[in-house]
Amino acid sequence: MGFAVAAEEPDECFDRLECAPNKSAVLAKLTPHQLHGCLALAAQRVEQSRHQAVLDLDAELDEEFPRRDVRGFLIVRVRDAREGTKPRPAGRAKRTAQLTVWRPEELGDGFLRVGGRYHVGVVVPKGTWRRTTEEITLTTRRDTRWSVFGGE
């Protein structure tokens, strides 16, 4: 009783190999072409199994721990561009702030860039402000308006 048939498809060889009690005897009878086909099919089934396991794990995690509704933010250091009329002490920089920008993706890619000048309307203070603090913290709101300053 011969196991290898030249016209046998790789999936038929693989199924026969899975069911055989003596797998070594089946492997010994396969041609190199059939063996290569079985190995390729085994690799494909392993990949499918791995992919299904990831999907099952994701579904289980989503059921156990539902996804949170989160929004993106970006913290940028800004400097007041107004010169003002009061002379500043030597070596003192212009007023600076850390600005928390909520949902920066809504501004569009590349809108905020280093060195850019912007007019920002409707920001609110965040944290505590002290006269001794060099830098203040501000945050945007839903109704914050942005425009590029100077027509850049």
Image (cartoon, rainbow, N blue to C red):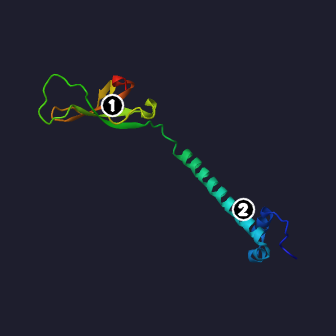
Say which of marks 1 and 2 sits in front: 2
Dividing the picture into quadrants, the one containing residue 70 is top left
Dividing the picture into quadrants, the one containing residue 115 is top left
Q: Mark 2 — residue?
A: 41
The quarter of the image holding the N terminus is bottom right
Q: Secondary structure at mark 2?
A: helix
On the image, the x and y values in percent for residue 44 come to 68, 59
Q: Which label is found at residue 139?
A: 1
Q: Nearer the viewer, residue 20 or 139?
A: 139
Query: Dot 2 surroundings within 10 Å: few (below 14), some, or many (20 or more)?
Result: some
Q: Nearer the viewer, residue 63 or 83?
A: 83
> Mark 1: which amino acid?
Thr
On the image, the x and y values in percent for residue 48 come to 66, 56
Q: Is residue 28 left or right of residue 65?
A: right
How far is the residue under mark 1 from the one under mark 2?
A: 56 Å
**Total residue callouts:** 2
On the image, the x and y values in percent for residue 33 come to 77, 68
Mark with earlier residue (1, 2) = 2
